[in-house]
Amino acid sequence: MSAHTRLRRISHVELRVRDLTESAGFYGDVLGLERNTDTRMARECAWDAPCANGDVGFRVVLVQGLPPGALLSGLDHLSFEVSSRSDVIDVYERARSRQMRATHPRSCRGLFQTYLFDPDGYKIEVVAQDDPATEKSGPPHGREPGDPDYDG
């Protein structure tokens, strides 16, 4: 790479998964990514993460091939930015309605965030700039310590 080359954005993140159908449901139904039907990716399942302006921010490519019981390594998490606190809560509630692991939405260093875990255990962050003055703050549904999905 020459000294003048600049990286523009993430092109894609490729994840090896145990079950393409289950993982595709998570990335499409819970996170709202759009299926990419590019025929060059016939053996893979690709999902586009659209930006607010309609362009693709980056692509998540799912590849069948993670053996059952395999330990995941090398990836801490994927992070998706959304527009508002209510969007974070909405994604959290969709994940919980599917009995998926998700951390309680919270404010942290100027961000409002939740972490979800996809069907293969990959950690997914959903985050918005925290502006409690414009939106109701506090946990959704009054979750308290002791609730199964409350992590403080």
Image (spheres, rainbow, N blue to C red):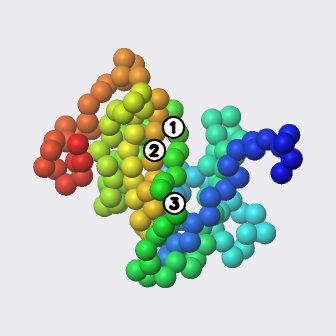
Amino acid identity at mark 2:
Val
Say which label, 2 or 3, has the lower sequence index: 3
Q: Are marks 2 and 3 in contact (CB under 8 Å)?
A: no
Residue 12 in the image: state x and y as whole percent: 67, 56
Mark 2–mark 3 Cα distance, whole angstroms, equals 16 Å
User: Looking at the image, is mark 2 or mark 3 nearer the viewer?
Assistant: 3
Nearest the eye: 82 or 69:
69
> In the current view of this chain or complex, which residue is farthest to the left?
146
Residue denoted by label 1: 82
The residue drawn where x is 32% and y is 58% is: 101
Residue 138 in the image: state x and y as whole percent: 26, 31
Q: Are marks 1 and 3 in contact (CB under 8 Å)?
A: no
Residue 145 in the image: state x and y as whole percent: 15, 44
Amino acid identity at mark 1:
Val
The residue drawn where x is 30% and y is 27% is: 137
User: Looking at the image, is mark 1 or mark 3 nearer the viewer?
Assistant: 3
* Residue 81 in sight from this viewpoint: yes
4 lies above or below 115:
above
Mark 1–mark 3 Cα distance, whole angstroms, equals 21 Å
Amino acid identity at mark 3:
Leu
Residue denoted by label 2: 126
* Residue 86 in sight from this viewpoint: no
In terms of image quadrants, where is residue 87? top left
The label number, if any, that marks residue 75 in the structure image: 3
Q: Are marks 1 and 2 in contact (CB under 8 Å)?
A: yes
Mark 1–mark 2 Cα distance, whole angstroms, equals 7 Å
Say which label, 1 or 2, has the lower sequence index: 1
How many numbered tags mark residues here?
Answer: 3
- The secondary element bearing badge 2 is classed as strand
Q: Is residue 125 left or right of 137 when viewed as pictured?
A: right
